[in-house]
Image: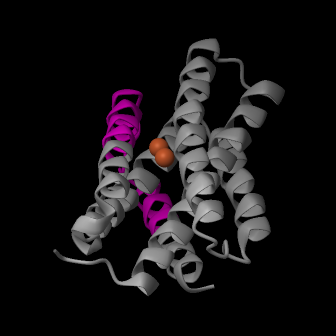
Amino acid sequence: MKKTNKKILEEIIRVDHAGERGAIKIYEGQLLALKTLKQDEELKRKIEEMKEHETEHYEYFDEEIKKRNIKPTKFLPVWDLLGVTLGFGTAMLGKKAAMLCTASVEEVIDGHYQDQTYKLGEDEESLKQKIKKFRQDELDHKDFAYEEGATKKGLYNILDKVIKTSSRIAIAISEKY
Ligand SMILES: [Fe+2]
Ligand SMILES: [Fe+2]
Protein backbone atom coordinates (compact mmCIF):
# COMPACT_ATOMS: atom_id res chain seq x y z
CA MET A 1 0.00 0.00 0.00
CA LYS A 2 1.34 3.38 -0.99
CA LYS A 3 1.54 5.61 2.08
CA THR A 4 1.31 9.37 1.96
CA ASN A 5 4.39 11.32 3.00
CA LYS A 6 3.49 13.05 6.26
CA LYS A 7 5.10 16.37 5.43
CA ILE A 8 3.41 16.49 2.04
CA LEU A 9 0.09 15.58 3.62
CA GLU A 10 0.39 18.48 6.05
CA GLU A 11 1.27 20.86 3.24
CA ILE A 12 -1.74 19.71 1.22
CA ILE A 13 -4.19 20.31 4.03
CA ARG A 14 -2.57 23.58 5.10
CA VAL A 15 -2.61 25.10 1.63
CA ASP A 16 -6.11 23.92 0.74
CA HIS A 17 -7.43 25.26 4.01
CA ALA A 18 -5.90 28.66 3.14
CA GLY A 19 -7.03 28.55 -0.48
CA GLU A 20 -10.65 27.74 0.21
CA ARG A 21 -10.76 30.46 2.78
CA GLY A 22 -9.23 32.83 0.23
CA ALA A 23 -11.95 31.86 -2.23
CA ILE A 24 -14.65 32.80 0.30
CA LYS A 25 -12.91 36.14 0.83
CA ILE A 26 -12.74 36.86 -2.90
CA TYR A 27 -16.48 36.31 -3.23
CA GLU A 28 -17.12 38.39 -0.11
CA GLY A 29 -15.21 41.23 -1.75
CA GLN A 30 -17.17 40.84 -4.95
CA LEU A 31 -20.48 40.82 -3.11
CA LEU A 32 -19.44 43.93 -1.22
CA ALA A 33 -18.73 45.73 -4.49
CA LEU A 34 -22.02 44.53 -5.97
CA LYS A 35 -23.89 45.68 -2.89
CA THR A 36 -22.38 49.13 -2.73
CA LEU A 37 -22.27 50.07 -6.38
CA LYS A 38 -23.42 47.73 -9.07
CA GLN A 39 -26.85 46.21 -8.93
CA ASP A 40 -26.94 42.84 -10.60
CA GLU A 41 -29.26 40.51 -8.71
CA GLU A 42 -28.69 37.51 -10.95
CA LEU A 43 -24.91 37.74 -10.67
CA LYS A 44 -25.17 38.32 -6.94
CA ARG A 45 -27.24 35.19 -6.51
CA LYS A 46 -24.76 33.10 -8.47
CA ILE A 47 -21.75 34.43 -6.57
CA GLU A 48 -23.53 33.67 -3.32
CA GLU A 49 -24.07 30.13 -4.53
CA MET A 50 -20.38 29.69 -5.40
CA LYS A 51 -19.47 31.16 -2.04
CA GLU A 52 -21.56 28.45 -0.40
CA HIS A 53 -19.54 25.78 -2.20
CA GLU A 54 -16.30 27.41 -1.04
CA THR A 55 -17.64 27.48 2.50
CA GLU A 56 -18.35 23.75 2.31
CA HIS A 57 -14.80 23.17 0.99
CA TYR A 58 -13.28 25.39 3.66
CA GLU A 59 -15.20 23.72 6.49
CA TYR A 60 -13.93 20.33 5.41
CA PHE A 61 -10.29 21.45 5.53
CA ASP A 62 -10.85 23.39 8.72
CA GLU A 63 -12.10 20.21 10.33
CA GLU A 64 -9.12 18.23 9.00
CA ILE A 65 -6.58 20.78 10.12
CA LYS A 66 -7.94 20.63 13.67
CA LYS A 67 -8.45 16.89 13.75
CA ARG A 68 -4.91 16.23 12.55
CA ASN A 69 -3.32 18.96 14.58
CA ILE A 70 -1.78 20.74 11.61
CA LYS A 71 -0.70 24.35 11.94
CA PRO A 72 -2.63 26.64 9.60
CA THR A 73 -0.55 29.07 7.56
CA LYS A 74 0.49 32.20 9.45
CA PHE A 75 -0.53 34.18 6.42
CA LEU A 76 -4.30 33.73 6.83
CA PRO A 77 -4.89 37.38 7.83
CA VAL A 78 -2.86 38.53 4.83
CA TRP A 79 -4.79 36.29 2.44
CA ASP A 80 -8.07 37.49 3.96
CA LEU A 81 -7.18 41.06 3.18
CA LEU A 82 -5.80 40.35 -0.28
CA GLY A 83 -8.75 38.10 -1.12
CA VAL A 84 -11.33 40.74 -0.28
CA THR A 85 -9.27 43.35 -2.14
CA LEU A 86 -9.00 41.19 -5.24
CA GLY A 87 -12.70 40.39 -5.20
CA PHE A 88 -13.75 43.96 -4.57
CA GLY A 89 -11.35 45.36 -7.14
CA THR A 90 -12.29 43.00 -9.93
CA ALA A 91 -16.03 43.46 -9.34
CA MET A 92 -15.53 47.23 -9.45
CA LEU A 93 -13.85 46.88 -12.82
CA GLY A 94 -16.98 45.21 -14.11
CA LYS A 95 -18.60 41.87 -14.67
CA LYS A 96 -15.99 40.66 -17.17
CA ALA A 97 -13.14 41.27 -14.74
CA ALA A 98 -15.08 39.73 -11.87
CA MET A 99 -15.73 36.61 -13.91
CA LEU A 100 -12.15 36.50 -15.13
CA CYS A 101 -11.02 36.56 -11.52
CA THR A 102 -12.98 33.35 -10.87
CA ALA A 103 -11.76 31.75 -14.12
CA SER A 104 -8.10 32.59 -13.46
CA VAL A 105 -8.13 31.35 -9.89
CA GLU A 106 -9.99 28.16 -10.77
CA GLU A 107 -7.56 27.40 -13.59
CA VAL A 108 -4.72 27.45 -11.09
CA ILE A 109 -6.69 25.38 -8.58
CA ASP A 110 -7.61 22.82 -11.22
CA GLY A 111 -3.95 21.88 -11.72
CA HIS A 112 -3.18 22.29 -8.04
CA TYR A 113 -5.87 19.84 -6.92
CA GLN A 114 -5.01 17.40 -9.66
CA ASP A 115 -1.34 17.35 -8.57
CA GLN A 116 -2.41 16.71 -5.01
CA THR A 117 -4.46 13.66 -5.90
CA TYR A 118 -1.28 12.12 -7.38
CA LYS A 119 0.66 12.82 -4.19
CA LEU A 120 -1.87 11.17 -1.89
CA GLY A 121 -1.42 7.49 -1.11
CA GLU A 122 -4.00 4.79 -0.60
CA ASP A 123 -4.04 5.57 3.10
CA GLU A 124 -5.71 8.90 2.32
CA GLU A 125 -8.47 7.73 0.04
CA SER A 126 -11.26 9.78 1.60
CA LEU A 127 -9.21 12.99 1.43
CA LYS A 128 -8.39 12.21 -2.18
CA GLN A 129 -12.07 11.74 -3.01
CA LYS A 130 -12.94 15.05 -1.36
CA ILE A 131 -10.27 16.86 -3.35
CA LYS A 132 -11.56 15.29 -6.56
CA LYS A 133 -15.09 16.41 -5.74
CA PHE A 134 -13.98 19.93 -4.86
CA ARG A 135 -11.93 20.10 -8.06
CA GLN A 136 -15.08 19.33 -10.00
CA ASP A 137 -16.92 22.13 -8.20
CA GLU A 138 -14.09 24.51 -9.13
CA LEU A 139 -14.29 23.43 -12.76
CA ASP A 140 -18.02 24.20 -12.68
CA HIS A 141 -17.23 27.66 -11.29
CA LYS A 142 -14.72 28.20 -14.09
CA ASP A 143 -17.24 27.15 -16.76
CA PHE A 144 -19.85 29.46 -15.29
CA ALA A 145 -17.35 32.34 -15.32
CA TYR A 146 -16.68 31.86 -19.03
CA GLU A 147 -20.39 31.58 -19.78
CA GLU A 148 -20.87 34.88 -17.98
CA GLY A 149 -18.27 36.74 -19.98
CA ALA A 150 -14.82 36.03 -18.57
CA THR A 151 -12.30 36.89 -21.26
CA LYS A 152 -8.53 37.06 -21.67
CA LYS A 153 -8.57 39.50 -24.54
CA GLY A 154 -6.54 42.71 -24.43
CA LEU A 155 -5.86 44.08 -20.97
CA TYR A 156 -7.75 41.21 -19.37
CA ASN A 157 -4.83 39.05 -20.41
CA ILE A 158 -2.60 41.01 -18.04
CA LEU A 159 -5.13 40.73 -15.24
CA ASP A 160 -5.28 36.97 -15.80
CA LYS A 161 -1.49 36.69 -15.51
CA VAL A 162 -1.37 38.86 -12.38
CA ILE A 163 -4.10 36.83 -10.66
CA LYS A 164 -2.51 33.51 -11.62
CA THR A 165 0.97 34.54 -10.50
CA SER A 166 -0.36 35.89 -7.19
CA SER A 167 -2.33 32.70 -6.62
CA ARG A 168 0.74 30.57 -7.26
CA ILE A 169 2.83 32.64 -4.87
CA ALA A 170 0.13 32.39 -2.20
CA ILE A 171 0.03 28.62 -2.71
CA ALA A 172 3.81 28.23 -2.40
CA ILE A 173 3.87 30.30 0.79
CA SER A 174 0.85 28.64 2.38
CA GLU A 175 2.24 25.15 1.88
CA LYS A 176 5.39 25.91 3.85
CA TYR A 177 4.52 28.70 6.27
FE1 LIG B 1 -13.37 25.74 -3.42
FE1 LIG C 1 -14.40 27.76 -6.62
Secondary structure mostly taken by the magenta-highlighted segment of the chain: helix
Query: Does the magenta-highlighted stretch encompass residue 85?
Result: no
In the image, 35: left or right of 112? right
Locate residue 66, reporting x and y percent. Answer: 66, 62
- For the record, the magenta segment spans 135-164
Quadrant (top left/top right/bottom left/bottom right) for the C terminus: bottom right
| Foreground pick, 84 / 134 | 134
Is 117 on the left or on the right of 157, as rendered?
Answer: left
| Residue that extends furthest to the front in the rendered view of this protein | 1
Can the viewer see residue 15 in this picture? yes
Q: Residue furthest right?
A: 36
The quadrant of the picture occupied by the N terminus is: bottom left
Quarter holding residue 86: bottom right
Place of residue 13 in the rendered image (x, y in percent of width and height, measured from the top left): 50, 67
Q: Is residue 144 on the magenta stretch?
A: yes
Q: Is residue 6 left or right of residue 27?
A: left
